[in-house]
Amino acid sequence: MLAAVAEDPMAKPDTTEIAGRIERLRREIDEHNYRYFVLDDPAVPDAEYDRLVGELEKLEAAHPQLVTPDSPTQRVGAKPAAGFETVAHDIPMLSLGNAFSAEEVREFDRRIRDVLDREENCYVAEPKLDGVAISLRYEDGRLAAGVTRGDGRTGEEVTSNVRTIRSVPLKLRGPGIPGRLEVRGEIFMTRSGFAALNRRLEKAGQKTFVNPRNAASGSLRQLDPGLTADRPLRFFCYGAATSDGLPDTHMAILERLKEMGIPVSPEVRRLTGVDALLEYHADILSRRDGLDYDIDGVVYKLDDLDQQREMGFVSRAPRWAIAHKFPAQEELTTLREIQVQVGRTGALTPVARLEPVFVGGVTVTNATLHNIDEIRRKDVREGDQVIVRRAGDVIPEVVRALHERRRKELPEWNMPAECPECGSRVVREADQAAHRCTGGLVCPAQRKRALEHFASRNAMDIEGLGTRLIDQLVQADLVASPADLYRLDAETLAGLERMAEKSASNLVAAIAASREVPLGRLLFALGIPEVGEVSANQLARHFGSLEGLARATSEELEAVPDIGPIMAGKIHAFFREPHNRAVVEDLQAVGVQWQAPEDAGGGDDRLAGNTYVLTGSLSSMPRSEAKAALEARGAKVTGSVSKKTTAVIAGDDPGSKLEKARELGVEVLDETGLAELLGED
Ligand code: IVH
C-alpha cells in the first residue's frame, strides 16, 4: 500500500494515511541524521538516505498543507530581509585563557587545587575546534535561534543559515527536554569539504577561501540561506549557556545533550590529574593531521559545576577552564627572494627564501611556491609579507601574500629563461604547469637529483649517500652517472671536505653492497619517468629481465596490470634513448647485478586486484618485506585507507589507519591473516 503512495503521491487521496507516512519518513530521516552526526554510526548508505528525503519531498510537494517548519525538508527558508540583525546574548559568550606550555597547564591545575584545597582535579578535555562559535536556542525542543558569538555580548542572528546545517537538529529528541535550552558550540567546515568547495569555486572562476575557518565563517554569513545550504558545514556542541534542567557535571551535560540529538566531538574525555591532560594534548597533537577538521589546541574544563562556580571568572574568561594551544600552523614572515630549484626530471620549482619563522613546531626558512601559475594566482612578489603554512610533515608553503601591506610597488617575478644550474634553455610544454630545463643529464642539478634518487632507500638503498655528499661528488666531477659511484675508492672519498676515513670506507662498502639488487628496485632507481615503486615491481615481475623490458613494445607494456598508455609510452621512449641504454650498460660493466623476482614471468597472481594497507609493526618481518611479498602476489600496497582498500593489516601499535579502517568498515587482518594471504600458514 505505502509503496504505491511513495511512487505516486497524487494517486492516494487519503491524507491521514499520507500524514502517517510523512511522519514516519521524518522520524526515520531524523534518526539517520542522529546516527550519522551524533553517534558517528550511520545505519544506511547515503543513497538510501537521499531516497527517503526524495520521497518526503515529493509527498510534501503534493500535500503542502502537511509541511511543518521542523520537517527535515524545511532547512532552507526565506532570506532575511536586510542583512543580519544584531542581538544581545542573554548570557555572554566567554573567551578562554591560553596555555602554550606544559608548565602553564601545571600552573592552571595548581591554582585550582589550591583554591579548592584538593589533591587532584577531575577535568573534561575537548578538542578546540577552529571554526565559528555559535549559540543555539531551543524553545520547547525546537530550534528557535542561532546567534554568532560576535564580541561575546552581542552577535548576529543567523538562524535561517544555521537551519541549513544538517548536523544541527531542528527538533530535539526524547523526553524531558527543558522548555528553554541554549547550547553553545562551534560551526566548522571539514578539510575534505573545504578542499572540494575551493575546487568548485576555482572552476567557477570565483574567489577561493584561504582556510576552513574562513570558509565556515563566510558560508555562515551568506545572505542567501540557499548558498549556506550548499556549503559542507558541521556543528559540534561544547556546552550549554546555563545548567538549568541539566545534570551537575560538564561531562554529564555533554552526554545529556548528545541524548537529545546534539552532536558532541567523539574526542571528549573525562580525565583525572594534570598528567592525564598533558597526555591527552600529546595524543591529539600527534593525530592532528589525521583529523578531518582543523583544531588549534585542546580545552580543559573542570568537570564539577559546583567547583566551577567556586573558581569563578577573571574578566571574561573562566578560571575553571583553559585552552592548551598547539603550535600555530600558519605564521607571518617576509619573503626575501624567490629562487628556482631544478628537480630530477628538470622541472623548475620556485622556492621562497624566507625570513626565518617558527611555524608548525619548527623554524622554516624555505617554502614551496609550486609553479609560475601559483605565483601569479597568489600574486606573490619578492619583498612581500607572506603567510607561511606548515602542517605536519607537509612541505611548508606560502599560502598568500598580504598585498595591503606592500609599502611600494614590487616588480613581478618571472621564471628564468635559462636554467640557473647549467644555462640550458628553459621551456614550458603547452599543457604543463612546470617549466623545465632542457639540459638533461648535462645539467648538474638534474644529475644530482637523479643520483640522489638512485641511492635512496627504496631504490638502491646506499646508506650514507645523502644530498650533501652527492652535491660534493658532482661538483668535484667525481661522479657523473650512477655507474661512477661504483668506481669510487675510499682514498678519493677521504679527500672530500668533512669526510673522515672511516666514513669513506663505510660508504665504499655500502656502495659495493648495493651491487646485487632486485630488478624492481633497479628499475625504480633508474628514474624512468612516471615509474614509481609499485609499477617498477610490476614490470620486474612481468618481464623478469631488464633486457626483456627494454625490448618491449608499447603494446606489450600496456598489457602489464595498471600500466596505462602514458606510462607505457614513457618507458618505451626511455629505452630508445641511447644515453639511457648507456647508463644501463655501464652499470652492468661495473658489476651491478639484478635478480628477477622468483615468480617473474606471470607467476603468482593470487592477490591481483586487491589493495592492502600496512600499519603498526609486524613481528614476523619488516613492513617493507611484507609489502614486497604482497606485491609479488599481484596485490597493491598503499599508504592510506579508503573504501577501495581490501584489508588493513595491523601489527603492534597500529596508528590512525586502523581507526579509519573501522570507520569505513574495511576488513582488518592481523599477522596470522597476513601469513594466510601469503600462503605461509
Ligand atoms: S569553551 C567558558 N570549548 O574557543 C568557555 N570553546 O576562546 C567558553 N572553542 O571562540 C568556551 N572549541 O568557540 C570551548 N571545546 C571548546 C571549544 C571552544 C573551540 C572556541 C570558542 C571560542 C573560543 C574561546
Image (cartoon, rainbow, N blue to C red):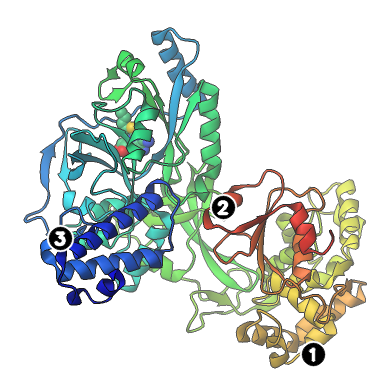
User: Mark 3, residues whose alpha carbon is within 10 Å: few (<14), some, or many (≥20)?
Assistant: some
Q: Is 279 rendered above or below residue 668?
A: above
* Residue under label 3: 67
The reply to whether dot 3 and dot 2 touch (C-beta < 8 Å) is: no
Residue 325 x, y percent position in the rendering: 44, 34
**Which circle, 3 or 1, is nearer the viewer?**
3
Q: Taking 539 as reference, is 342 left or right?
A: left
Which quarter of the picture shows residue 215?
bottom left
Is 347 or 12 nearer to us in this picture? 12
* Residue under label 2: 662
Q: Give the residue at x 10% y 55%.
A: 80
The amino acid type, in three-letter code, at marker 1 is: Arg
Q: Is any atom of residue 413 visible in this view?
A: no
Is 360 or 625 nearer to us in this picture? 625
Q: Give the residue at x 46% y 14%.
A: 110
Q: What element carries label 1?
A: helix
Q: Taking 371 as reference, is 441 left or right?
A: right
Q: Quarter holding the N terminus?
A: bottom left
Q: Is 20 rendered above or below residue 123?
A: below
Marks 3/1: CA distance? 71 Å
